[in-house]
Image (cartoon, grey):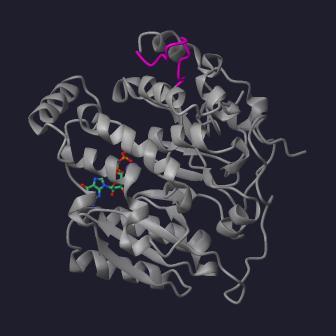
């Protein structure tokens, strides 16, 4: 019996499919990677994994985005990794227009740098790196407007140094379209409160001001009973409460993998939401990541059934991974999967492997499918 985790939607397919070869119709979609020239080794690893597990059968185009000019080495090695991987894919290497990357004029840069230095002292990861803030802001509010992506509707975000541990033998874009989905993820975890101290409170105000009705996804992200004990104890110290006392439990989709409809991000509602956040300045005075921004936007603006959990996509982005099957008693006994069960009931996991030909590296910490799942 396949028992997908309680409040997550089931996968589009179970097990292996016969990959549809290049003659069948494709969605209007691209594989998109933002990277630096120095990310080339990790980029090549990710590309090899995506080509092998998926794109050799589907031939979707790749678009690479960078705030700097691409190096010859990056283009050559990436081009080779894609063509070695089989299947013909268009490849474009693009730079990001300056208006999409960098401080907007209403940010007080001295103030921003002071905040960054202070966050750095408080050991908030990446907070001292200006370029990381620009990256988070770009991924929150601009990538979908990049000229190279304007003709695409769907995108699959690929980061350097990731790995897919199952074969993806069906077309996830086509299935998203067919099933009326707008946003898909494979891992949801807890945000570190200190990176986004005021984000939730601001969004709760925004939600009230715009009279946005509460969805069950929003409610799930507010329910502290989903929190594991140690975090539940800590969370009360965070200022993320709305005027009614609701508290964001910090659950968010891990956006380093996502498959989504860019028309969602291009909608008037999302643009208004992003402008509100951007004008506040928290991309610089705090360290708001694109993951909580995308997640809270989905919780605010999408119907819960428009959000898809790719329960069949085994995925590694260090330090965590998601495996498509629950650790068996045997694996638990041998400590092979090192599951991070954090007090949760193992029965919430799928009982048997959902994906196709999956493998799990026992040395990487395995997280449960979603933090709002019991
Ligand atoms: P983490 O996943 O939060 O640990 O951060 P990463 O270092 O993986 O960065 C997230 C994504 O943004 C990756 O795709 C990086 O290649 C990309 N990225 C981060 N900083 C920069 C930057 O300054 N320039 C460019 N072009 N890409 C960046
Ligand atoms: Mn990353």
Q: Is 284 left or right of 327, judged from the image as shown?
A: left
Please report the residue visible at 64 percent of the width from the left and 80 percent of the height from the top.
57
Q: Quadrant of the N terminus?
A: top right
284 in relation to 197, above or below: below
Side (left or right) of 364 relative to 323: left
Residue at (35% x, 29% y) in the render = 195
Name the quadrant containing residue 290: top left
Q: Is residue 242 magenta?
A: yes
Q: Residue furthest right?
A: 1
> For this rendering, which residue is in front, 77 or 141?
141
Predominant SS along the magenta part: loop
Residue furthest left in the image: 110
The span shown in magenta is 239-249
* Residue located 58% across and 35% down the image: 338
Q: Is residue 81 left or right of residue 373?
A: left
300 vs 304, left or right, is left
Task: Measuring from the top left, give residue 241's x and y in whole percent.
Answer: 48, 16
- Residue 335 colored in magenta in the image: no
Front residue of 329/9: it is 9
- Against 49, residue 309 (above or below) is above
> Between residues 371 and 73, which one lies in front from this camera angle?
371
Residue 137 appears at what percent x and percent y? 33, 48
Question: What percent of the width, then of the height, locates residue 96?
Answer: 27, 66
**Visible residue check, residue 318:** no
Question: Where residue 127 sits in the image (x, y, percent)?
Answer: 25, 35
């Amino acid at each position: 019996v396949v028992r997908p985790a309680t409040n997550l939607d089931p996968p589009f397919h179970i097990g292996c499919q016969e990959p549809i070869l290049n003659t069948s119709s494709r969605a209007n979609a691209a594989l998109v990677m933002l990277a630096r020239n120095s990310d080339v080794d990790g980029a090549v690893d990710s590309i090899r994994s995506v080509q092998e597990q998926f794109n050799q059968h589907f031939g979707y185009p790749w678009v690479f985005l960078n705030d700097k000019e691409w190096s010859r080495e990056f283009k050559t090695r990436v081009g080779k990794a894609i063509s070695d991987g089989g299947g013909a894919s268009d490849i474009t290497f693009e730079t990001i227009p300056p208006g999409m990357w960098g401080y907007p004029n209403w940010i007080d840069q001295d103030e921003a740098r002071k905040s960054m230095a202070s966050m750095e002292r408080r050991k908030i990861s990446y907070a001292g790196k200006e370029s990381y803030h620009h990256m988070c802001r770009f991924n929150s509010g601009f990538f979908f407007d990049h000229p190279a992506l304007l003709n695409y509707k769907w995108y699959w975000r690929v980061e350097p140094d990731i790995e897919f541990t199952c074969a993806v033998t069906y077309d996830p874009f086509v299935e998203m379209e067919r099933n009326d989905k707008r946003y898909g993820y494979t891992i949801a975890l807890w945000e570190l409160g200190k990176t986004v101290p005021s984000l939730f409170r601001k969004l709760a105000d925004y939600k009230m001001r715009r009279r946005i009705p509460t969805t069950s996804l929003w409610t799930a992200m507010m329910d502290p009973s989903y929190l594991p004990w140690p975090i539940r104890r800590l969370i009360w110290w965070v200022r993320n409460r709305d005027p009614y006392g609701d508290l964001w439990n910090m659950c968010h989709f891990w956006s380093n993998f996502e498959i989504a409809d860019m028309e969602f991000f291009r909608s008037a509602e999302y643009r208004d939401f992003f402008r509100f956040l951007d004008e506040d300045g928290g991309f610089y005075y705090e360290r708001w990541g694109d993951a909580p921004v995308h997640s809270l936007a989905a919780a605010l603006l999408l119907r819960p059934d428009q959000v898809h959990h790719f329960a069949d996509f085994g995925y590694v982005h260090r330090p965590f991974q998601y495996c498509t099957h629950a650790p068996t008693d045997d694996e638990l006994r041998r400590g092979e999967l090192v599951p991070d069960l954090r007090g949760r009931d193992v029965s919430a996991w799928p009982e048997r492997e959902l994906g196709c030909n999956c493998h799990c590296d026992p040395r990487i910490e395995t997280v449960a499918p979603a933090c709002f799942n019991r």
